[in-house]
Image (cartoon, helix red, strand yellow):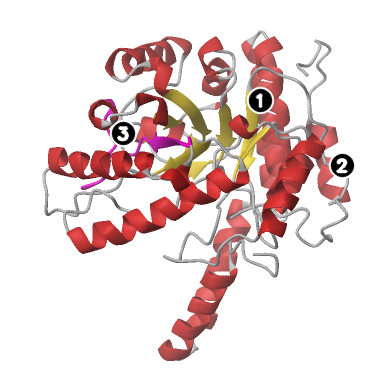
């Protein structure tokens, strides 16, 4: 870690202007519940609340510490394992620990954007499967309410090729209306994420989001999270200030800027309109670093959680650096300075212990080893690993 930080310090360009005050990084999960490692970056005050999707492994309150460690003013997390339909209930001791840590470090619940399970598909025309998704969805909302959180982000779902887009949108809205009437969900706002537009997936077009919102009865309980990689992959250009202005203006006219409740900030490994969801580090993909300057300088993105879901490469310096650079954006001018900061992020990504080239090489080695393991044993091992990864459960859950 010391070597990584030394590399970063030497790669950062000098900048004299005043600075404005996630595959998941786990900088604090090895610490005890009563101790926290010193942060890699201090939090700085800014109207743009930038953070990352951090790990809640070892206890959901650890997400707060992991956000603090990278200098985040906002964060996302999974409230339970995203690979399981059911998880143990949150215990009161866990809820108290989470709230205490939020208060201790001054995090506002409205800047926390929990992410829903990847299993949920409330657009499924199969009534039994849709009901199973709904129960998982409802459980997540209840967890948000108990934790004092006000937002909940989810993927809208898919037609699975057995319904029209309009029919699946109606199913999704019906589930939202039912959930909003359930007292266990409190006043949590359900935040729909835009998607890359692949296959039968709902949410690739702004009109899909509009149609869901229009069918929701309580408009105070619904919002939208815009993922920059998904937008770009779906064909919405945001690479220049003019392109961003056109896209966000289109969103305003089609959906309504008042519904923008969060942003997932990701570069894209694939080109405009590819319909492929492949996140890249800020400035390392086809969107380009300068584009994000306009997004985090736009007054319309102030006060909402702006969450990185870029590859962490198992190195907390990556997100800490991305956040640090993005926090400087509103006070910066001149493309040369901006490109120098882009180079700083690229340097720490390339220099991290698990850079992209090394990751590919490692995957090849793992694949070779896996090929020698019997398929049945592989399946058991994979299942155990999946249950362990990103599981928020521990003795306090």
Pinpoint residue 394: horizontal percent, then vertical percent: 67, 68
Is 75 positioned to the left or the right of 195 in the image? right
Disc 2 and disc 3: Cα gap in Å?
39 Å
Residue at 61% x, 61% y is 392
Q: Which mark sits nearer the N-terminus, 1 or 3?
A: 3
Badge 1 density bin: few <14, some 14–19, many ≥20, Cα 10 Å: many
- Mark toward the start of the polypeptide (2 vs 1): 2
State how far apart marks 2 and 1 are (Cα).
20 Å
User: Contact (CB < 8 A) between labels 1 and 3?
Assistant: no
In terms of image quadrants, where is residue 226?
Answer: top left
Q: Callout 2 environment at 10 Å: few (<14), some (14 to 19), or many (20+)?
A: few
Secondary structure of the residue carrying numbered label 2 = helix
In the image, which disc is placed on residue 234? 3
From the viewer's perspective, is residue 334 above or below residue 397?
A: above
Q: Which residue is mark 1?
A: 326
Residue 42 image position (x, y, % from top left): 83, 32
Pick the quarter of the image with the C terminus: bottom right
Task: Work out whether residue 348 can be spotted.
Answer: no
Asked if residue 206 is positioned above or below residue 233 in the image, the reply reads above
Q: Would residue 35 be seen by someone viewing this image from the given angle?
A: yes
Find disc 2 in the rendering and name its residue.
6
Q: Residue at x 76, y 35 (%)?
A: 71
Is residue 295 within the magenta segment? no
Element carrying mark 1 = helix
Identify the magenta region.
Answer: 187-206
Q: Is residue 193 magenta?
A: yes
């Amino acid at each position: 870690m010391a070597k990584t930080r030394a590399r970063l310090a030497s790669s950062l360009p000098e900048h004299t202007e005043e600075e404005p005050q996630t595959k998941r990084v786990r900088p604090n999960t090895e610490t005890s519940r009563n101790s926290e490692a010193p942060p890699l970056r201090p939090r700085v005050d800014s109207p743009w609340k930038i953070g990352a999707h951090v790990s809640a492994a070892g206890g959901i309150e650890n997400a707060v510490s992991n956000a603090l460690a990278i200098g985040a003013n906002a964060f996302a997390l999974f409230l339970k394992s995203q690979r399981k339909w059911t998880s143990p209930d949150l215990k009161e001791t866990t809820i108290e620990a989470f709230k205490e840590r939020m208060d201790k470090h001054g995090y506002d619940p409205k800047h926390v954007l929990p992410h829903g399970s990847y299993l949920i598909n409330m657009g499924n025309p199969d009534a039994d499967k849709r009901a199973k998704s709904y129960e998982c969805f409802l459980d997540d909302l209840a967890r948000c309410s108990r934790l004092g959180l006000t937002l909940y982000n989810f993927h809208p779902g898919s037609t699975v090729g057995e319904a029209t887009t309009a029919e699946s949108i109606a199913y999704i809205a019906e589930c939202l209306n039912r959930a909003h009437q359930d007292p266990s969900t409190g006043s949590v706002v359900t935040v729909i994420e835009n998607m890359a537009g692949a296959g039968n997936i709902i949410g690739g077009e702004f009109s899909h989001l509009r149609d869901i919102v229009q069918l929701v009865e309580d408009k105070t309980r619904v919002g939208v999270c815009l993922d920059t990689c998904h937008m770009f992959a779906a064909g919405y250009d945001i690479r220049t200030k003019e392109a961003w202005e056109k896209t966000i203006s289109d969103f305003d006219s089609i959906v309504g800027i008042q519904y923008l409740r969060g942003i997932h900030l990701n570069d894209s490994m694939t080109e405009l309109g590819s319909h492929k969801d492949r996140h890249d580090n800020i400035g390392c993909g086809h969107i380009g670093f300068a584009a994000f300057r306009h997004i985090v300088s736009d007054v319309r993105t102030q006060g909402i959680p702006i969450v990185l879901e870029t590859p962490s490469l198992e190195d907390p310096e990556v997100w800490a650096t991305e956040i640090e650079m993005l926090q400087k954006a509103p006070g910066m001018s001149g493309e040369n300075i901006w490109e120098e900061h882009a180079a700083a992020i690229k340097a720490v990504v390339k220099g991290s212990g698990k850079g992209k080239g090394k990751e590919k090489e490692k995957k090849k080695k793992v694949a070779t080893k896996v090929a020698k393991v019997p398929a049945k044993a592989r399946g058991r091992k994979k299942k155990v690993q999946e249950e362990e990864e990103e599981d928020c459960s521990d003795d306090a859950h």
